[in-house]
């Protein structure tokens, strides 16, 4: 069976993550479950690996990689940005800005499901 691995890197301090990352985690867990319902019967399994990061690696937080490649690598029109994150600031005790994705004039704090799904479907040819 072919495997497509989604890795989610996120800030974790004393077992807690920020609201933005928490929303991404919930989205990914649901998306992976749905993708597996479609893809496993076609010989493709989608896995989710959660990689907790400390405050020293916050610039990588809320990053989604598919088979080791950042989501934005598959779509050149996606730009990586950042915006202030009160939730991360509460966790680290200092002012923080977190990763965003910008596409088509919109800024996304949580990576859009359609981009992740599209890349998995392209790689696995299963949906």
Image: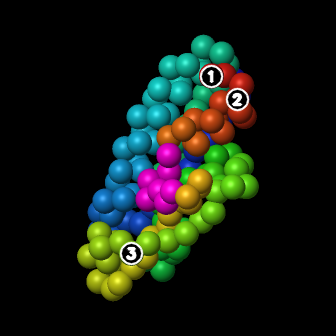
Q: Are marks 3 and 2 in contact (CB under 8 Å)?
A: no
Label 3: which secondary element: strand
Q: Which residues are magenta?
A: 106-112
Observer-side mark, 3 or 1, equals 3
Q: Is residue 38 left or right of residue 55?
A: right
Q: Nearer the viewer, residue 65 or 82?
A: 82
Instruction: State the residue position of label 3.
Output: 84
Measuring 53% from the left and 25% from the top, which residue is drawn there?
36
Q: Are marks 1 and 2 in contact (CB under 8 Å)?
A: yes
Q: Is there any visible trace of residue 32 in the rendered image?
A: yes
Label 1: which secondary element: loop
Q: Are marks 3 and 1 in contact (CB under 8 Å)?
A: no
Residue 67, x across and y down, in percent: 68, 46
Where's the N terminus, which quadrant? top right
**N-term mark: 3 or 2:** 3
Instruction: State the residue position of label 2.
Output: 124
Specify the farthest residue to the left: 90
Identify whether 47 is placed above or below 21: above
């Amino acid at each position: 069976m072919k495997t497509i691995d989604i890795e989610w890197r996120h800030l974790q301090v004393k077992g807690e993550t920020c609201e933005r990352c928490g929303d991404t985690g919930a989205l990914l867990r649901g998306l992976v479950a749905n993708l597996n319902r479609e893809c496993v019967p076609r010989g493709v399994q989608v896995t989710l690996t959660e990689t907790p990061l400390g405050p020293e690696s916050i610039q990588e937080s809320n990053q989604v990689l598919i088979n080791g490649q950042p989501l934005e690598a598959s779509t050149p029109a996606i730009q990586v940005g950042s915006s202030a994150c009160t939730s991360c600031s509460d966790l680290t005790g200092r002012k923080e800005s977190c990763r965003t994705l910008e596409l088509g004039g919109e800024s996304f704090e949580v990576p859009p499901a359609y981009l992740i799904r599209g890349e998995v479907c392209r790689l696995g040819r299963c949906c």
